[in-house]
Image: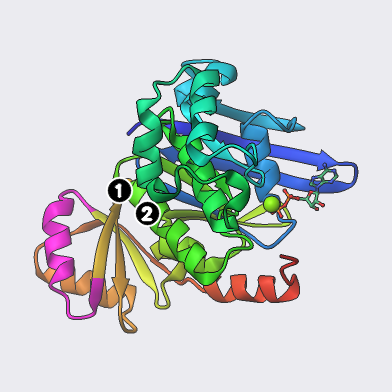
Amino acid sequence: METILSIKNLHKRYGYVHAVNNVSLEIQKGNVYGILGPNGSGKSTTLGIVLNVVNKTSGEFSWFDGKMDTHEALKKVGAIIERPNFYPYMTAKENLELVCKIKGINYSKVQEKLELVGLMERKDSKFRTFSLGMKQRLAIASALLNDPEILILDEPTNGLDPQGIHQIRDIIKFIASQGTTILLASHLLDEVEKVCSHVLVLRKGQILYSGRVDGMTANEAFFEVCSDDNLVLKTALENHPSVEKVVEEKGKLLTYVNQDLSASDLNRFLFEKGISLTHLVKKKNSLEEQFLEITKNHPSKN
Ligand code: ADP
Ligand code: MG
């Protein structure tokens, strides 16, 4: 697995505000990561630090396995962390061509990226005539001009109408399906569930959960299991009537079940099939409820 970004024990203090409190995250190539948390939980600060626009207080982060310095690495990163801003009296095409000129990118990329974000028909319209959703899509096209390894988006759907939100989410999913790694910050649980494969949940700068999105939202318990032969184990698990799905992660099989099944029942079932486990842990996840509770106490200002 290729590591795009590795964050270790990151801290940021603004006076007495501990904006980022011991955050760690490994970003692997090809996944879609969400940083989820209510307003003020430290999402933008975390993104700002790894993009070198905010100074960390302590901790480490490294891009691309530390093979290059941050300045070089950031040339392979496409990021939108502020409201998109282009020249209002220039067209969409002209604005993107200007970006190409500055960054030394071939102009042929302009058409490709305008198509990707569905703005080809409006390429000759002036930026000032664009809706907020179109501006945001143009910003995404711009960030993708140099085919970055990773696209970073801070609250990509904020302020958009439902149709605009839907378009942006579809574009993000499409970009991800093409193999681009994505990191996005959002205060919307629903958005992260729909778009991301992995999530870091923050509250007051601290990690509440880190892992797969399906692990976070599982209503029922799930098991972490391993044996010497996970392939045989997976088949056996999938044949158990209570098992909904089995996801492999870091050599462990995350087994989601649809009804109350005890660890000893599962163990017996597998033992009877001639499988002995090297690892069996039952986990219960009520994070979704916790998250809804948190956001209720910190209403969105947006
Ligand atoms: P989020 O993006 O999750 O809404 P932020 O990272 O913007 O959260 O903010 C985290 C905390 O840090 C908040 O308490 C915020 O008020 C504080 N903060 C952010 N930027 C600054 C700054 N430049 N100066 C002082 N405090 C800041
Ligand atoms: Mg923010």
Dot 2: element: helix
Rendering colour mode: rainbow
The kind of residue on which mark 1 rests is Ser
Q: Is residue 166 magenta?
A: no
The answer to whether the residues at label 1 and label 2 have Cβ atoms under 8 Å apart is yes
Apparent side of residue 231 relative to residue 32 in the rendered image (left or right)? left
Picture quarter with the C terminus: bottom right
Q: Is residue 283 above or below residue 83?
A: below
Q: Position of residue 218 (x, y in %)?
A: 41, 72
- Residue segment shown in magenta: 227-244
Q: Which residue is mark 1?
A: 177
Viewer-proximal residue among 270 and 48: 48
List x then y, in percent, for residue 11. Answer: 72, 39
Residue 289 sits in quarter: bottom right
| Residue at the image point whose x is 64% and y is 36% from the top | 87
Residue at left 45%, top 25%? Answer: 64
Q: Is residue 225 left or right of residue 71?
A: left
Which quadrant: the N terminus? top left
Outermost residue, right side: 15
Q: Nearer the viewer, residue 53 or 95?
A: 95
Distance, label 1 to label 2, CA atoms, is 6 Å
Report crowding for label 2: few under 14, some 14 to 19, many 20 or more residues within 10 A (C-alpha): some
